[in-house]
Amino acid sequence: MLKPLFVGLFLITAISFLNCGAPKRLINNEKAFPEELIHFVPYDHNPVFAGTGTNTWDNQIRERGYILYEDGLFHLWYTGYKPGMDEEKHLGYATSTDGINWTRYKDNPVYSAGWVEDVFVMKEQDTYYMFAEGKNDIAHLLTSTDRINWTERGNLDIRKSNGEPIGKGPYGTPAVLKEKGIWYLFYERDDLGIWLASSKDLKTWTNIQDEPVIEMGPENYDKFGVAVNQVIKYKGLYYAYYHGTAFQDWSKWSTCVAVSRYLKNWEKYERNPIIGEDTSSGILVNDGKQLIMYTMHPDIRLFYPTTRQP
């Protein structure tokens, strides 16, 4: 348990980082949304990965998988399940040399001791951190040192800005960014808004504010639901890739983007969505040459930037 004085000083530091300087409008600045971050064309033979459709534990896949490119190899973690009475979601792993043709790990699922869904993976020094949804959309943390064997670290403890626990209910689709020793967590609650919390020890997360930093609407494309999939820093600005829906029944989702200087105040791209046609849970992957995009739901599809390099 952090001591009250330390918590106070930590929160002041985190909030100061988020609010330094006067926020400026970016949406009308063409440089705020570079071509390589917003314009993509689909690979001709999508999807590149999907459920097996056979009698396997990963007959179907769903929601956000995650891909890291390291040492010439693409690494994919995905959620699989078999429709029926027991649809608990488990974790699978696959690799690819070209980002198109994938080989499932022979001993999948790599984690089946509990519910793992909607995963976000990042590497810090020699450890891989996986932030994922568990049962009932409660975010939890797993760690690994080899990409395959994962250890459960427990549900995320998220607090209001005053230190009190957030209200009961789901808090899912976790996406994380680390800046200057501080971890920043973006999460949704029933897909009705995106909140931001911070932590220095990965044990307790404290809301930067108790209202969403990204809200639904007012445009139609994300009027009925939003959730962040990935936040990146690019040329001094932060970009949140998120999915939104224009349908009250959540039947279709699209991939959108927003920009920020300090993580707290976000401006949506005025021509969202950047990828429609019910392709959502989009993330960018640096393949060593450029940023390519994968959308993860309802299957995995590859998109190249219009500025594609040979």
Image (cartoon, rainbow, N blue to C red):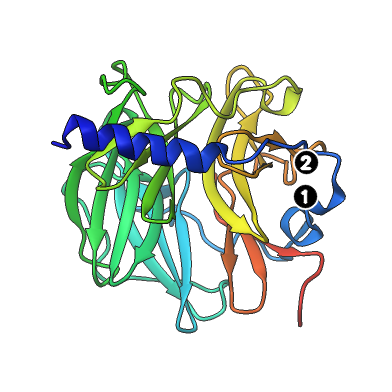
Q: Say left or right for 283 vs 8.
A: right
In this rendering, the answer to whether 79 lies above or below 46 is: above
- Point out the image quarter for the C terminus: bottom right
Q: Residues within 10 Å of mark 2 (few under 14, many from 20)?
A: some
**Residue 26 visible (yes or no):** yes
- What type is the residue that disc 2 sits on? Leu
Residue type of the residue flagged with mark 1? Ala
Classify mark 2: helix, strand or loop.
loop
With 207 as the anchor, is 228 left or right in this view?
right
| Callout 1: SS | helix
> Residue at left 24%, top 69%?
145
Q: Which residue is mark 2?
A: 26
Identify which residue is drawn at 31% across, 54% down: 91
Q: CA distance from mark 1 to mark 2?
A: 6 Å
**Residue 300, image x and y in percent?**
55, 55
- Residue at (58, 19) in percent of width and height: 249
| Image location of residue 294, percent across then percent down | 60, 58
User: Of the residues under marks 1 and 2, which one precedes in the sequence?
Assistant: 2
CB under 8 Å between discs 1 and 2: yes
Q: Which quadrant of the figure has residue 23?
A: top right
Q: 137 or 298, which is in the foreground?
A: 137
Residue 9: give x, y in percent of width and height.
31, 37
Q: What residue does disc 1 label?
A: 32
